[in-house]
Image (cartoon, rainbow, N blue to C red):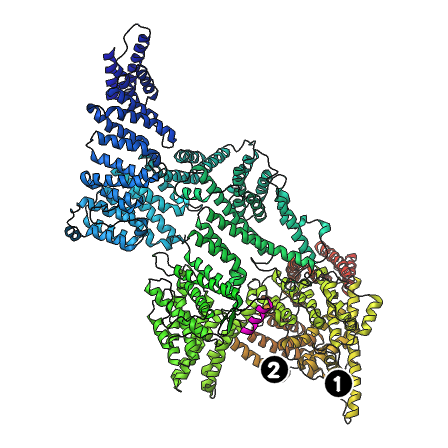
Amino acid sequence: MDLDIRQYLTKANEQQDSGALQSAYSLITEMTAAESGGRTPRAAPELYVLCAEAALQLGCLEISAACLKMYFEGNPPANQFLCRAYLCQGQQKSPPATGSVEDFEEAVLYFLKAIELSKHEPRYHFMVFNASVLYFQTVRPLLQPGRRLHLVSSLRQVVQSLEEVADQDHSWRAELMMHLIESLVDSGKMEDAGSFGKVTEEFIKTHTAHLYPKLFTLLSQSKPPPSSCRHVLNIGLKEINEEELTKKAELEEIFHQLVDTKASTSLQITPIQPADRVAFLLELAVLALQVKHQKVAADCLKKLKSTGEASISQRIIMECVNCEINLLKKEAKMNDYSKASVEARLKEIGKLDQWLHTAVREGDPRSMQAVCATQWSFCLPLLQHNLRKRIKTPLLRVAQVLEDIQSMLLEMRCQVHSELAVIEEEEGRLEASLTHLQKAMLLDNGTQRESLSSAFRLLQLRQTLYQTPSWAEDKAAMLLQQARDIKPEDNTDSRPILVAVGLLLAPADFQMVLDADNTSKIPVGSIGSGPAAQLSAEAQHYSTSVQKVDGHLARQAENADNTERMKLWATLVKTARKQEVWDVCRTACRFCLLYDNGRWKISKTDMEECLHSCDGSQSSVRNLLRLLAEIHFINAEAIVQKLQTKGVQLNSPAVPLQERGVCLSDEDPHWIIYRDWIQALSDYATSGFLRAAELGAEIREPWLAANAAIYLWNYSSHLLAAGEYQRLLPTFQKLVEMPRETEYTGNRALFVLLCDAVARGFIQPLCGPDSGEPALTGDMGKNRAEKGMEKAASVQGVFLDPTALHDVRKALELCDYALRMSNCNISGETVPIAARKQVVATWVQLKRLLHQQIGSKLDMDDECQNEEVSAMTRVLVGVEMLQCNRNPRHMEFSVPSLSTLVSMASECSWSDAVVELQVWCQLAAFCHYANDHSLVLCCTKNALQLEEAAAKCLSTMPCVLYGLSAVNEMLSSAACLSGLSLIHETGGELHSYREAMNILLFSVSYAEKAENPALCVAAARHYWNTCLPLTHTPEQRCQLKEPLEKILSALVNTNTKHSKVKARLGESVLMDMQKLQHEGEQCCSFMWHRAALCAGNMTQKLTCYQKSISSLLSAETRWQKASLLLEFGEWLYCHNFPKADAQQQVQWAIDILLHLETKQTEGPEDESKTRNTSSEKCESLVGVHGSSFTQCLSNLREVQCLDSLVQAHTLLAVMADRTSPEYQLNLLRAYTFVILIWQVSMAVVCEISSDLEKNQPPQPPPSAGSKKGKDKGKGKKVKDPPPAEDKPKPVVLDQALPSTPEAWARYTQSLFYLNLLEKELHSLSLRHLTLPILHLAEAFAHDLLDRRSLSDLYRLRIVRTCCLLGMETHSPYHEKLMNLSRIQEQEQMGSHKAIVLSQERRSFLNQKAKTDEIAASWRPSMDVCAQDIWLDKAEVCLSIGLYQPARQLLTEAYLVAVELGDQIAMARSLLSLAILACDEQNHAQALILLDKAQALGGDEEFWYQLTLTKVRAVVDQGDQDAQTKIDQIIKQSCGALKLALEQRVNRHPKLTFLITTLEMRGAIECIHATDSIEPGETHCTEAVQRLLAACDTLRHCASGFTKLNYREQAAKSNAECAHGLRLVSQE
């Protein structure tokens, strides 16, 4: 039986035959069973061991275990097979790599038993070696930091046993000895590690010198005591520790000793073998990369390549080193995530992937692992949502290779599989993702257990989408995944899903807290009247709602998993933030941050241990605290977003009341509640950022503090720009302290700027408001005295009390620290010189405050070893000292001469062109003040050469503190100083003089680019003063034309852009308007009005109009307010806002105008008590009726007020329906006010005339028209007191003409409304009421505007009206028709001059055509153009049959319009010429003119008249298809008007009238065409049908006219309809 068993086992081992193994095992079990029954002898004991070994080799672990069990039950003897049985038992018990320490210790016990048994018998000594190998294979997973300490005892026993048996494999023993050193260091037994290190060193010296590189690396990284690290390499190397490795000299000396063979000879050291030198150099290169010393690494690599003795595996590692060096070279550019940097990194990853293929082919695990580690470091920055899929293939290969070689880089393998799981999940491959997560969980050492298990469970939930989980947390997780899967292009609203998640996690509280952002949930009874009360209610509602979150944790179930729920809240926060569902984000943040209550903490001791090796619980706590820090960031960001929706920036106060259009004082309790709420939100957001930084410091992750600093710096940019350093002091001071405590050396530039901001905050109370200039002594002393502070220290001109002195010294300490941080001593950690310049400026001012001289060498104790940086710093110090010396009230520094500073600046190698530009500009200014013009020219020449470099620098520098505008401002200043100095140096030489003028022109150009009106005006003034001597001859003036035109263009652009460009771009102008607060309400209102006129969108126009009106609060500004309200009401009406809103504004203006007398007697009151000006929907008593209206009329004596009332009631009439009583009532009221103007004016005329008769001899009476016009004009000015007067003065003749375009525009505006009033009265057939209106308009035109032609137009209209009334003989102008209808010579000359000026202006100005405003408003521009007057006169002439004057007017108007590019006037001219052609029976010519006019276009009235004229021409032309053409013309025009009808709702009645009139005209022409048959003939059936259709149309038109209150047109429609019916009845 034994023989059979042996044969089976031999076959199983040789042929890997599991069947033979099974047969042998069956025989063994049979013999064992038989023996127990006493039948047969037991099998030989060694057979059990042999079978167990064979089973172990074939993977049949059950058979192996059973055989060993039977073997040990037989009490085997202590021989070789017992040792082998122990070894087999140890291999069976070997746990996987993720097994526990206890499982490893159990397996190790059997190996140690085998070793202990074998070493006592010399013939079994080989078993000690075998056992050591199997032992090492088993414990290999523990050979990593944090786990090696468990191997100290067993590994020491193995090493000692090998020494006891004098094993001859010295390399193997040396390897184990080095592992023992690492285990001792890991366990903290440094003394034992040191003593054993000596033993190992001697052993390796004696037996295995080739292992020196590994020992060198081990001892340099494990930080043993210096005494144990001497002469590691046996080549005269110095002692090394971690701090020394950061110094260039240490690594470079090691490198030189490795490559310098002469040094080895002189020291009588055994020369290093080439293979060993290659290994040493490779290890040194890797070590240099670890401390980022790329020069030594590159030198090692270069030497390795030159030797050419590296193996393939070593060459692969060399390539990894080369890739790392390239990464360090491009680190700054590779980390900006630009497209180019990402592509460059992907290219390097592709190269490494190819080298990994090569390493796999070579089969060297060390090189494979090295490539994988390098590949992972390159892939790390690309593990982002939009980039990680591009590195999936390389990561899969890395994971597979590391798995194949059973790499001990378990943490890296775990991370790789975790990232691959995320990538697969994003691609929808859930099974593959689960597989990677399972592998990661097996490889995890416990630090990622919670996150991996959570991700695994979520993936399992995703696989069961159609099953509803029982736990609320699982439901929430599923919904969150659905929300995260929504893609932006899906246009799906994720908010309901996110709200549902919140309700699952907090059913009772989430909705109540969420309603904080919903103003519709404000209780109705809590809202008072007025905007301030609404704001107060909103603030109180928000505060009350968010308080509902308190106590949520206490209300949770006792068995709730707080960790899991916190993570779900965090996921909800991140998802809502990503999808910008801000209210849900803010609400979820508040619930999530409830868990930041100290429940998770890491002590300092645990933190120190965790930094080296974390267990699972410590790592979990760190992850939770890190997650809370991230939520604090998001919460603060969401609060800032809410502040911005309220028009407030972080840490800025609420917008003042007058800037919000709310007419309430700052002491209003409602406003105080709102203001404090805004401030509380800012404080809450700031505390969130700071808390995140604190958590970062707690878990020793400085990047969190750095992110907090970045957030707060960016969100505080408006305060930094305004110099509000003191307001930022508490916040920034905490940010500075945190990095200093954690020794953070990350974003040094930001930290330096923070230090500077804190230092400036400390000294800002001692300095002026703008820069760093200390405040005047008297003022500062007074302020300090009022606060009860004592003056303990003094400086020349500045006194410092103890508190101030302490602050100054703290600021100086911060500046010194910032200067040391920015000294650029460490390679790769440079700080931009722009940031250093900021600190230098503050440092110099602190030295002055402390009365400390700096010295002529300009040195500062900043430990700077970089000579280039030191040289730049010295120049910056000198410039700042010169700047301080310009203030004679303070201590004066001892500064080198200007020429010395200029020389120093020239010798510097500037790293920032913008800083260099600023330095040259400052030096040029100092030289200019010193009248050293040669130095000015030198400095400005250097400055102007930097234009391109500075612009490029702005786009490439990582830290940009200046904008392009600032660069252009500096260039403008430099050019200006250069031009002035060059003029001084010319000595009258013409060529140089003109060159200086060109440089000044460049200064203007740069100022224009910078959009700086002050610089532009200054440069233009200098140019003008310079060019004055060259203006004496026409030739010289001709040469100045083009430059002066450029300057004028620049002045126009900068000044208009400065105040209006933001409005045109649709941007907020609130900050710009705040600068005008001190100018008074009239100025603010004026600028808001200008912004409204320039605004590019409706919303901004509306806001600007409202603020323009609400800015006027005092009684002195009532005229301006009423005028703005009228304009605002007109604008609302013209832009199709609700009529009620527009009418309300006009009614409000009427109230102001009618109650002026009452307010003057009772005293001005704050109108905010009765109305709300923040909206166009004002709640006020609008409209005065009945007796009160009559009473108000009796008090009105000011012509300006009466004129405004005419405009207001005319506007109300136009806004009202013609069928409403208000339409005619408002027209009659407007007419009444016109009569009142006449009465008031005539009364004043009589009074003045009587006074003149007493003091002057009698004069011949003037003409009636002239007298009345002048008198009326005088009356208008008499009753218009200047705004500064509180009481009306006695009547005085004021013959001063208006001085501003706005004042002149008031009269043209009056004419516009008088024209409109006359037109509306005419449409009601109240022509007799139009004569006073026309006479008043004529007086305005003749005597106020001094426009003879415009006066003639109104006189022509008076003649026409008199003719219509049958009173032509009563008109005073009837006999002067020919004079009235001709073109005045002076006006014609002015028109031609305007043509010339327009042509010149168009050569350098880009003016908008007048057609831009056709559809925007129905009011003409401020000025009345000559061609428009001529066209109006021509229309009147045509209506009264004056054809020849009409032709002359139209011809001249057309020519002028063509030259000026006035398309509207051109179209009107062509239309009127067509009418004239029709009157002259030239119908073909009329149609040609009409086609040209139609191509140019016009408004609705134009299309209406064009259509009627074209119909007339077609009818009179008498073509056979005339009726068809007419139908087409009418249909086309009506269609166009109907489209306009849809767009302009408020013009509905007028447009309906035009359409109805055209339809009536078409029907009338149809009837007339049918009527033209011979007597006795009858109409065909088709003609009868057309007649009936036309009658129906006329009947419909008559009905429409009646509804619209056009009675004449309705009567005409009925008459024509009756005529058509008569024709039908005759058939």
The quadrant of the picture occupied by the N terminus is top left
Residue located beneath label 1 in the image: 1267
What span is in magenta? 775-791
Q: Name the residue nearer the viewer: 592 or 1452.
A: 592
Q: Nearer the viewer, residue 692 or 1362?
A: 692
Q: Is residue 322 magenta?
A: no
Q: CA distance from mark 1 to mark 2?
A: 27 Å
**Labelled disc at residue 1388:** 2
Q: Amino acid at mark 2?
A: Gln
Q: Residue at x 77, y 86 (%)?
A: 1248
Residue at 36 percent across and 77 percent down: it is 899
Disc 2 residue crowd, few under 14, some 14–19, many 20+, Cα 10 Å: some
Per the image, label 2 sits on a secondary structure element best described as: helix
Q: Label 1 is placed on what type of residue?
A: Lys
Residue contact between numbered discs 1 and 2, judged by CB atoms under 8 Å: no
Q: Is residue 959 left or right of residue 1364?
A: left
**Quarter-of-image position of residue 366:** top left
The quadrant where residue 353 appears: top left
Looking at the image, tell me whether mark 1 or mark 2 is earlier in sequence order.
Answer: 1
| Circle 1 crowding by C-alpha within 10 Å: few under 14, some 14–19, many from 20 | some
Q: Is residue 603 above or below residue 1524?
A: above
336 relative position to 792: left or right? left
Q: State whether residue 969 appears in this view.
A: yes
- Quarter of the image that includes the C terminus: bottom right
Residue 1506 visible at all: no
Q: Secondary structure at mark 1?
A: helix
- The image shows residue 554, relative to residue 731, as above or below, that is above
